[in-house]
Image (tube, grey):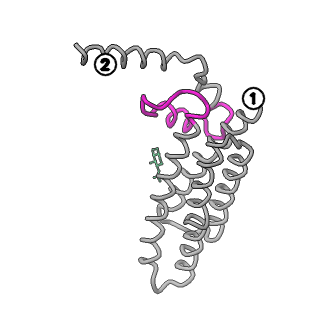
Amino acid sequence: MSRFLILVVVFLFCVASSYAANDVNLQDLCKQTKYPSFCLTLLKSKPRNVGGDLVSLARYSIDVLNTNASATVTLIKKLIAESRGVPKKQAHYKDCLDHFGEDGILGDLLETRLLLKSSDYQGVNIHMAGVMTNVDDCLSGYSSDTSLLPKYANDVNQVADIILIIAAILLKK
Ligand SMILES: *[C@@H]1O[C@H](CO)[C@@H](O)[C@H](O)[C@H]1NC(C)=O
């Protein structure tokens, strides 16, 4: 009986939360980003337990960005090891590690979580612009990079753009 009740409560909660009044129209939101179809795919694939309001979507996107940036750092470390003996290339990857690591993007993301928690949307916005600058600074250092790094970095850029737009909308509210 009690298990049945829990199921009913959980079911009602899911129904209620999927029709929450403050749910964002994802089409409208993603239209404002630089890469609308990437944005739609990402936000539509959010887990069910993530709310559909702007703050929940921002929090979820920051988690995705953190995973993306961590994967990029892992890749960069591998590329640094592989480019031993090719100083110019290795210097480029070491430079990218600075831009993506704790002193760069990963550090920015830690702060961004706190800023979102304290509803400092201007701060979130500034930090996402900082992430995108770090990505550009890394990529512009070496135009003939044929590794997976440009693709990984591009994912980071696109997710940062989504968070930047969400923060801009929250700021206007
Ligand atoms: C970034 O995250 C998205 C969504 O989870 C995923 O599809 C994409 O493959 C990730 N990219 C990298 C480089 O980890």
Amino acid type at mark 2: Ile
Q: Is residue 115 magenta?
A: no
Q: What is the distance, in whole Å, between disc 1 and disc 2 at their CAs?
A: 36 Å
Dividing the picture into quadrants, the one containing residue 24 is: top right
Q: Secondary structure at mark 2?
A: helix
Q: How many marks?
A: 2
The residue where tag 1 is placed is 173
Residue at left 54%, top 42%? 61
Is 39 above or below relative to 25? below
Query: Closer to the N terminus: mark 1 or mark 2?
Result: 2
Of the residues tagged 1 and 2, which is closer to the observer?
2
Most foreground residue, 1 or 78: 1
Residue at left 64%, top 29%? 29
Q: Secondary structure at mark 1?
A: loop
In the picture provided, is 42 more to the left or to the right than 1?
right
What quarter of the picture does the N terminus occupy?
A: top left
Q: Residue furthest left?
A: 1
Is 162 above or below relative to 26? below
The residue where tag 2 is placed is 6
Is 134 above or below relative to 121? below
Residue at left 55%, top 46%? 62
Residue 45 location (% of width, % of height): 45, 33
Badge 1: how crowded within 10 Å, few (<14), some, or many (20+)? few
Most foreground residue, 100 or 92: 100
Amino acid type at mark 1: Lys
Q: Which residues are magenta?
A: 30-57
